[in-house]
Image (tube, rainbow, N blue to C red):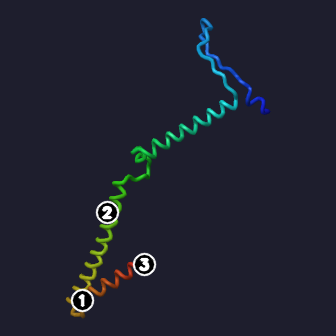
Amino acid sequence: MGKNNLNKVYRLSISEDDSHRMIRSFRFSRLGLAVTAITAFVVVLGGLYALIALTPLRTTIPGYPDAHFRRQAVDNAIKIDSLESAITRWKLYSENLSRVLSGDNTINLDSLLLAREAADSLSK
């Protein structure tokens, strides 16, 4: 296939079957047809990308969270952190209460909480 075949002009004619009247005629070369097909393909892909990426349609993609769910995830993480802190305080309180009931020395809760928070921040 040489360079000559790419620029060779072809004609596509659409005619009526009964009267053989020409309805439409197209002239094209192989190179022009290939360039037109590639351009149309790129334009369609760009349009689909723009439709999905720039509209709320992207939220229908599985695994893609919208702003509401991201905000809710951050709020839940903050709540979990505060609940873990409250559980730690309750554990220390119950341990201190059991020491008081058994007659042992009490624990200074403030110093333990500070020590545990320091250890938690170092482990993260």
Mark 3 or mark 1: name the one nearer the start of the chain: 1
Label 2, secondary structure: give it.
helix
Dots 3, 1 in contact, CB < 8 A: no
**Residue count near mark 3 (Cα–Cα under 10 Å), binned few <14, some 14–19, many ≥20:** few
| Residue at the disc numbered 1 | 99
Of badges 2 and 1, the one in the foreground is 2
**Regarding mark 3 in the picture, which secondary structure is present there?**
helix
Q: Amino acid at mark 1?
A: Arg
Give amino acid for label 3.
Ser
Tell me the CA gap for discs 2 and 1. Answer: 36 Å
Mark 1 lies on a secondary structure that is: helix
- How crowded pointer 2 is (Cα within 10 Å; few <14, some 14-19, many 20+) is rated as few
Q: CA distance from mark 3 to mark 2?
A: 22 Å
Task: Pick the residue in front: 89 or 70.
Answer: 70
Position of residue 38 relative to residue 11, above or below, is below
98 to the left or right of 40 = left
At a point 67% along the width and 25% down the height, the residue shown is 28
Which residue appears at 24% of the width and 91% of the height?
106
Q: Amino acid at mark 2?
A: Asp
The picture quadrant where one finds residue 54 is: top left
Residue on which the image places disc 3: 123
Counting residues from the start of the chain, the first of labels 2 and 1 encountered is 2
Task: Determine which of the numbered discs, if any, sits on residue 18 in the image.
Answer: none
Q: Which residue is mark 2?
A: 75
Of residues 107 and 117, which is closer to you in this image? 117
